Amino acid sequence: MANRLPHGTRCLAALLPALLLGACSFTEKAPPPACPDPAIVDGMDSNETLEPGGSGPEAVAWRSAMLGFGGGCTYEDGGVRLRYTIDLAVAPGPAFGAQDRSVPVRYFVAVADPAGEIIDKQVFSTPVPVQPFGAPVVATEQIEQKIAGVMPGEGAAWRIYFGLELPREEALRRRAGRP
């Protein structure tokens, strides 16, 4: 003869799987609020700097490029704090010269609101030490910025733009897609 469990124990045994599954929903964390969408501006990711008065491939002193970025955001104190790293590369060109020197790489970080209006743009310059006839050098920059008034749930509508800071005429030409 089989042993029978008391009625209360049988009910508990029947409800136990449902209770355990329900407990899972209490321990799962909600996903964090979305950050503003970052991107490198098309056409502003690389540049060739020519020696003064030079033209053509032989006059290239150095090439610079924005390779990528990483990071994210946190929501705090009535706004969103952005923390990013940006990887910049510099390679000497034929007209670089024979001396080691630091090359100034200028780049920007711009913030666009949900309507697409640029509300802030900051330009940074970082010296990157380069050796003549050497391999490309990669430098990693860290930036931190707070956008006040952006609350969780609103961040995904904002945009963060990165790019190399170019002379105005060159930037406009590239944005227009002309060679």
Image (cartoon, rainbow, N blue to C red):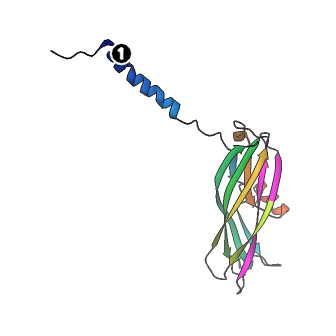
Name the residue located 69 percent from the left edge and 63 percent from the top edge: 141
Answer with the quarter of the image where residue 157 lies: top right
- Residue type, label 1: Cys
Residue 117 magenta: yes
Reply above or below: 116 against 106: above
Reply above or below: 105 against 52: above
Answer with the quarter of the image where residue 171 lies: bottom right
Answer with the quarter of the image where residue 11 lies: top left
Name the residue located 69 percent from the left edge and 53 percent from the top edge: 83
Q: Which residue is mark 1?
A: 11
Camera-side residue of 50 and 6? 6
Number of numbered discs present?
A: 1
Give x and y (percent) for residue 2.
18, 16
Badge 1 crowding class, 10 Å Cα cut-off, few under 14, some 14 to 19, many 20 or more, is few
Residue 13 magenta: no
Q: State the quadrant of the C terminus.
A: bottom right
Give x and y (percent) for residue 60.
73, 76
Q: State the quadrant of the N terminus.
A: top left
Hey, which residue is sitting farthest left in the picture? 1
Camera-side residue of 161 and 47? 161
Span of residues in magenta: 93-122
Reply above or below: 99 against 177: below
Name the residue located 74 percent from the left edge and 52 percent from the top edge: 161
Give x and y (percent) for residue 12.
37, 19
